[in-house]
Image (cartoon, rainbow, N blue to C red):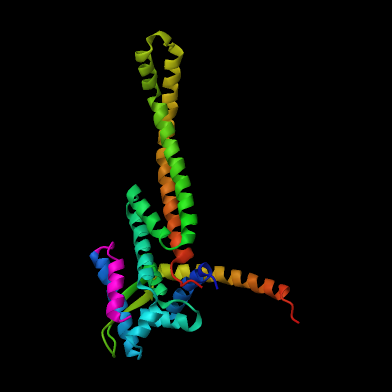
Amino acid sequence: MTKKQFISKLNASLKRLPYEERQDIIQDIEEYFVIGSEEGKSEEQVATSLGSPEQIAKELVAAYRVEKVEETTSTGNIIRAVWAVIGLGFFNLVIVLGPFVALAGVIIAGWLMGISFVASPIFVLLNVAIHPQIFEIFDLFFSIGLAGIGLFIAIGMFFATRAIKNGFVRYLKYTIGIVKGGLKHA
Amino acid sequence: MNVQFKKGVLELCVLVLLDKQDRYGYELVQKISEQIDVSEGSAYPLLRRLTKEGYFTTYLKESTEGPPRKYYKLADSGRTYLHELLQEWKEFSNGVNQLIKEGVKDD
């Protein structure tokens, strides 16, 4: 592979990164080729020793995605980061997707429980509207009690969601660093 | 040697190489690949990541032979991190060496 081919492959695989970021990376890799040729290496040799441009790009994109999540932890950003990290190798499928699905399940279940508790008086009133003959005052009080508990659950979930998100981002960063981040398959 | 194992060590290698002097990317990668069998291309994402984490700063310096080169300089936080990793490495390698000494038959 010539320098030009290497750079254009790298550039194509980095198209999801912002322009400045991509330029910066390409500049670094070009510098690498220039110094290599000053040391008497051919473009082919430098390209071979660098390995696959697609693999380098994957790692850079994954690192970028995780960095984005740290800036703004939106659900979309987290999913993109998870996806990019999974792309690094099969092993990551297990150690990233597994915890991700489990944690997402806990968060969704917690919120659903909180919300349905809070909404329970409405269900009781709906029930009364549909079947007025089976109204029991106990149901109403019980549901108001549930709504109170639901509010506490929702507040708890708010903090739990934030803590879980932060923890998971740390885990993603750790994964990038330890699992694959930088070495060829041995 | 397996990938995860090398990966953690590579981070330590880069930090160690920058402790005494600033170096440019090509030099760093060559130094490492002289000693350890790693793909040169995979060291680059590591350099970039550690720079973004604030462990290194970079600057451009003129070269006598060609265009300016990007030099990596170990920041204070990087030096702290290096010493943490070094400590872990020493404990780990001492432990492994001890087990090897006890476990491997000499004859």
The kind of secondary structure the magenta stretch mainly shows is helix
Pinpoint residue A86: horizontal percent, then vertical percent.
42, 58
Q: Residue at (36%, 17%) from the top-left corner?
A: A125
| Residue A15 part of the magenta segment | yes
| Residue A154 part of the magenta segment | no
Q: Residue at (29%, 79%) from the top-left corner?
A: A30
The quarter of the rendered structure image containing the N terminus of chain B is bottom right
Pinpoint residue A166: horizontal percent, then vertical percent.
41, 50
Residue nearer the viewer, A135 or B79 = A135
Pinpoint residue A57: horizontal percent, then vertical percent.
35, 68
Q: Quadrant of residue A169?
A: bottom left
Residue A152 vertical position relative to residue B88 in the rendered view, above or below: above
Q: Residue at (32%, 82%) from the top-left corner?
A: A33
Residue nearer the viewer, A59 or B48 = A59
The quarter of the rendered structure image containing the C terminus of chain B is bottom right
Give the farthest residue toward the right: B107
Residue range (magenta) = A1-18
Q: How many marks?
A: 0
